[in-house]
Image (tube, rainbow, N blue to C red):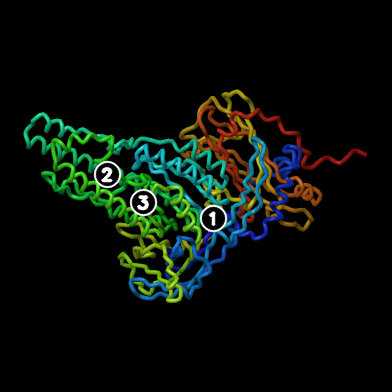
Amino acid sequence: MYAAGVVRPLQSPYRPEAAARMLSVLRLHSLLRTLPLGGALLLAASVAAAQSTPSQVPAPSTPVIRTGTQLVIVDVSVADHSGNPVHGLKQGDFVLTEDKTPQDVRHFEEHSADDKPVGPPMPAMPPGMFTNYTAVPADSTLNVLLIDTLNTPMKDQSFLRDQLAQFVKKSKPGTHLAIFGMGMRLYLLQGFTSDPEVLKNAVEHKLIPRASSLLDDPVGTNADVTNMSDVVNDSGGPADAVASLQQFEAEQQSFQTQNRVRYTLDALNSLAHYLSGFPGRKNLVWFSGSFPLSVSPDPSLTNPFSVEADMQDEFRETTNLLARAQVSVFPVDARGLMTLPALSAANSGTQYVRNPKAFSADVQKFSQSQFDEHTTMDQMADATGGKAFYNTNGLADATAKAIDSGSNYYTLTYSPANHDWNGNYRHIKVALSDAAKAQGMTLIYRRGYYAENPDGTSKTHQSAVVSEAAAAAPSSAANYVRLAMQRGAPTPHDILLKARVLPVSDKPDDTLAPGNTLDPAKPIKPPFRRYQIDLVALAQDLGFTKNADGTVSALIEVKINLYDVDGALLNIVGQKAALKLSPDRFKLLLQSGVQYHTQVSAPAKGETFLRIGVHDLNTNRFGAMEISTARISRLPPAQPPAPAPAANPAPPKP
């Protein structure tokens, strides 16, 4: 929900609205085929280093709808009786109420993945050559796959990997995906990409099954688990000792479950914070095996209520953060169709011989566990506008349906008639008008929100409302750069780029490349592997200004960040520069592109990630790409670039 004032376009500020980028794309194609890197105009030879930065940099033009009240945004997916998205509905086809009170829809917009034009495919690039061009539509929805290894047995993780491999093979062209993993913490496996080969490589080589230390059966064998209470009972120990051990074991299990819930919610909170930097709707497909929000009392124990736990407050905090970041969650039970563990072939059943009542108790416990876990999945989906998938082995199909549903939707915006921001939960209901209702359509949307005061700070919970100032203020240049240069973030392509990145030598060295700046708190240590970066930007995408003396000028910045696998920043290289060119040299620049050459030192061992960006400081446009050093570390060393012509060649002698 947005606070008083603004409804922003549902797209990233650096996924431009450009309706006619075809000409620039064709120019880039030509540039990629014909330009020999190193033989054209060098940035370093063509500019004067800027001594100061403008106090204020214009942000991209972003149309807004200004009002004087708080606004609630509801994304609604509509499907027919076969589950296919329904398009072409009008604002009058929807009836929206809040706590049974009709609301006036102030803004209505349809989003359709099918209607977005996909650009021409990029030709195959030679080894070591990269570009940020993508055929993905400029305002396509972002999708995140979250692999929950904390709550999922290893056997089910392996099944999930096979299913995701099938999904990647059959996914629609242009699907924009990132893959995160979750154990005791959140970690990035693959940043946002629409390249099917990159996604295939990530699924096949990065989705490695991991054992959870907080699961009773981390492998997923369903084999007998012998507890100390069973041993004491079998040996004829006293009944009070057996009861005490059973109480202790149940409390330990409850403690482990609560820890899993806390770790899970912390990871979802971190992901919500990360995704909140990118405006527009995001779809989170969360693959998990076991996530109960509460632990019920166990009547078989001496103290049944000692194991009881309820995490509703923490859950509310998480769903508020997700709603604020405009993230719709689609939970998927990674275990597929479940059978009673007591009937598993891996289970000998000897405990049921000793205690005939144990079988019925285990059946009841399993049924209650399934109910609690699936209820939690439904609650998460309802709170964020997604849909839960369980009791199915078709995980690939569930993933495709989730992304399809989240990419085809209608946005309804309204100002609540109730202005009492008392923190209470308000129910949202969206229905179809009589004419549309007769066609048997189903609707998916978030079912409500907590009415926290948008002008103040909640005492107990993170508000799902942003302040008016935060909603209305344009992104600063510094914040824009921070978001665009994050590891794994969507690659902005306001400015089209090409880069050749190759090792300088096939052997490590102990010296840091010139101009490199390491993190002083945790500097990387030699040996290093040094990489040569030859970068070219399409000059037509930069904002040049014509001066009174006939020259043209621009203010740009090149940034190169090196990250480790955990997203920690290791090394920074870059240059801020002011271009001032004569008409003749400007014509040369339009033909050859703006080039920049540098070297970056990375740890000789382990995978790291280069984030390369070009920022136009006058227009706040950005282009960036991300490259894993694992893709280039074994390539043949680079040849030194050819010398560039002097920036201001001396006139010939008479």
Q: Answer left or right for 73 relative to 371.
A: right
Q: Residue 143 appears at what percent x and percent y?
A: 49, 51
Q: Secondary structure at mark 2?
A: loop
Mark 2 vs mark 1: give the one in front.
2
In front: mark 3 or mark 1?
A: 3
Q: Which residue is mark 2?
A: 340
Distance (Cα) linking label 2 and label 3: 15 Å
Residue 268 in percent (x, y) is at: 38, 49
Give above or below for 607 relative to 87. Answer: above
Quick one: quadrant of the N terminus? bottom left
Say above or below: 127 vs 63.
above
Residue occupying image coordinates x 49% and y 73%: 91
Circle nearer the N terminus (2, 3): 2
**Residue 418, x across and y down, in percent:** 35, 73
Sequence-first tag of 3 and 1: 3
- Which amino acid type corresponds to the residue marked 1 in the rendered image? Ser
Which one is in front, 267 or 149?
149
Dividing the picture into quarters, in which one does residue 654 lie? top right
Q: Residue at x 47, y 62 (%)?
A: 471
In the rendered structure, the answer to whether residue 169 lies left or right of residue 394 reads right
Which element type, helix, strand or loop, lies under badge 1? loop
The residue lying toward the viewer, choosing from 190 and 391, is 391
Residue 153 falls in which quadrant of the image? top left
Would you say 446 lies left or right of 354 here?
A: right
- Cα distance, mark 3 to mark 1? 43 Å
Residue 289 rendering spot, x and y as whole percentages: 34, 45
Identify the residue position indicated by label 3 in the image.
390
Q: Is residue 201 visible?
A: yes
Q: Decide: marks 3, 1 in contact (CB < 8 A)?
A: no
Disc 1: which residue: 476
**How many angstroms separate mark 2 from mark 1 (CA)?**
55 Å
